[in-house]
Amino acid sequence: MAEQLDIKSRNASRLLAGQGSTAPFTEIPVISIAALFGDNLAAKQEVAESIRAACMQVGFFQVTDHQVDMTAQAEAFAAAKRFFAQPEAEKRKVSVQNSPLLRGYGGLLEENTDPDNDGDLHEHFDLALDLGPEDPDTLAGTYGCGPNQWPDLENFRDPVMAYHREMVALSAVLFRGFALSLELPETFFDPHITKPIAELRLAHYPPQTPQHDPEKIMGIGAHSDYDAFTVVATGNVPALEVQNAADDWIAVPPMPEAFVVNVGDLLQRWTNDLYRSTFHRVVNRTGLERYSLPFFASTNPLWELGVLENCQSPERPARYEPISAADYIGTLMRESYGM
């Protein structure tokens, strides 16, 4: 049975399958993941239980004790600010429209995650694993595999890629936590994240102004993420909101030393809607500039995974067909840009 992956029908299915399935939450859990870096399996299982509860009840949590180099993060934020401070013409030289992988610069209102809105009030720069033209996956045209675009900007590429490496390492640890939370072997995902779609976004949100209809234009409209899970450095400006089962928008307070982690569509598919790819949005009402660094963690692009065996039964049959990350993410990313 063929699936429709257009954004509008996908959003409707998320509402039916994931939203409203539990009592409304009023805050986002905070989880220390220190044990995931050690050898104590019992301690790891305790963390995994906390992850499981957060994924079933909220779809979001914040992680502390993550071992990410915060100097690398600070340098990535600084590089983002330098990039977005450039004249528009300079940023346009690396437009996503030049890249079949949709990497590079996207301007204000160019992306639209919610088709009922008039565009997203942010600009961004996207990058991923930087593969050369002779890489076999680049040559094959596999979505998620290929070269990044780079601006002619001093002290940009190196700090951004250093932070990308930090995020790839953290996501590998989190994949193990998710595996344990699903009663799978800790290393279940390891063979399938050796060359993953690992997209990092540098995002800049100007303040909302009266000229922007707050019901039609916001930093990012209500949406769920396409990937397996997302790891976000939110900075210190509050703007992220998560929708609970009562359709209330719950603010996520910034914790500059922590990361926000949220379930993406692929993980919801794999778990047969047990884990929730929860709707969220960004509304910058502070009057301040806001910068964030979301990292979209997924598997190797061509690995196909359907509903996990232990997430289905005769009473709860599989709701989704197997699909690769390249097919799922690539289709929806192209549609979000109208391509």
Image (cartoon, grey):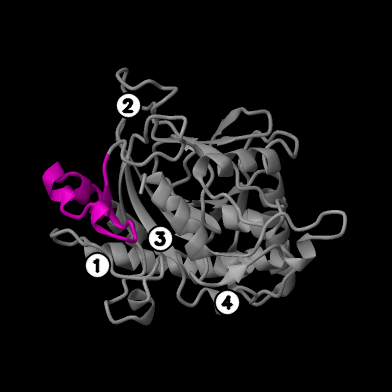
Any magenta on residue 97?
yes
Q: Nearer the viewer, mark 1 or mark 3?
A: 3
Q: Amino acid at mark 4?
A: Asp
Label 4 packing within 10 angstroms: few (<14), some (14-19), many (20+): some
Task: Give residue 199's mark.
Answer: 3
Element at badge 2? loop
Give the x, y percent position of residue 106: 28, 46
What residue occupies the far right of the structure in this picture? Answer: 315
Residue at (57, 41) in percent of width and height: 9
Element at badge 3? strand
Task: Using the image as rendered, state which of residue 144 and residue 202 is in the foreground.
Answer: 144
Nearest to N terminus: mark 3 or mark 2: 3
Residue identifier under label 2: 287
**Image quadrant assignment for residue 313:** bottom right
Q: Are marks 3 and 2 in contact (CB under 8 Å)?
A: no
State the separation of the CA atoms marked 3 and 2: 29 Å
Label 2 packing within 10 angstroms: few (<14), some (14-19), many (20+): few
Q: Amino acid at mark 3?
A: Glu
Nearest to N terminus: mark 1 or mark 4: 1
Label 3 packing within 10 angstroms: few (<14), some (14-19), many (20+): many
Nearest to N terminus: mark 4 or mark 2: 4
Q: Amino acid at mark 1?
A: Asp
Residue identifier under label 4: 190
- Magenta span: 78-107
